[in-house]
Amino acid sequence: MRMLPLHGLMAEFRTPDELLRAAATAHDAGYKHMDAYSPLPISGLEEAIGVRRPWMSRIVLIGGIAGGLTGYLMQWWISAVDYPINVGGRPYHSWPAFIPVTFELTILFGAFAAVMGMLVLNNLPQPYHPVFNVPRFRLASRNRFFLCIEASDPRFDLQRTREFLESLSPEEVTEVEP
């Protein structure tokens, strides 16, 4: 009987195609809580492990809209409400003069939203993760590809999941302890 809870089971593969095929097979088998680790980007891997559509585009859009509104409304408030000064007979609400600052704050807020969104959605900074306990995982930054099925998955059963991963012809299947 296990004394420590298990984070999951990790399978090691030699090529990106093997990892992609294994991830798609695991997803088709009903596993939903899994992650893949690779030293390089693999086209189609997100779909293979069932990652939902990313929120980044929406986060950046909201940040950009907030920045544009902030820039425009700040200038309007200053020049038309708080401290109106008639310069050369121009109207207080002279919108063409507001365009450069509005554009710059749109870009600035969008960039800040992108950085903050990336950090939050990627759970960064993350100085510790249970997969770091697997001795061969250091190869994930060099030339190996890993698929980890987490114990939190509803279909996870230690013996059945191990047999399933071994049927995918990995180099090795390892238990990941927290």
Image (cartoon, helix red, strand yellow):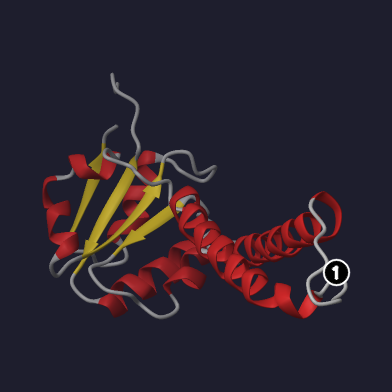
Picture coordinates of residue 10, whole percent (x, y): 28, 51
Is residue 69 visible from the viewing direction of this image?
Answer: yes
Where, quadrant-wise, is the N terminus in this rendering?
A: top left
Could you tell me residue 96's position as x and y percent?
A: 76, 80
Residue 72 horizontal side relative to residue 20, left or right: right
Q: Position of residue 12 (x, y in %)?
A: 22, 60
Q: Residue at x 47, y 64 (%)?
A: 49
Q: Is residue 54 above or below residue 116?
A: below
Mark 1 crowdedness (10 Å alpha carbons): few <14, some 14-19, many ≥20: some
Residue 54 in sight here = no
Q: Is residue 21 above or below residue 123?
A: below
The three-letter code of the residue at mark 1 reads His
- At x 25%, y 41%, the residue is 175
Q: Quadrant of the rendered structure where residue 5 is?
A: top left
Question: For the point 29% across and 32% down, which residue is it?
Answer: 178
Secondary element at tag 1: loop
**Would you say 134 lies left or right of 108 here?**
left
Count the labels in the image: 1
* Front in this rendered view, residue 70 or 111: 70
Q: Which residue is mark 1?
A: 93
Choose between 31 and 146: the one closer to the eye: 146
Identify which residue is drawn at 86% across, 76% down. 89
Across and down, in percent, residue 155 comes to 51, 46
Residue 159 or 53: which is nearer the viewer? 53
Foreground pick, 116 / 159? 116
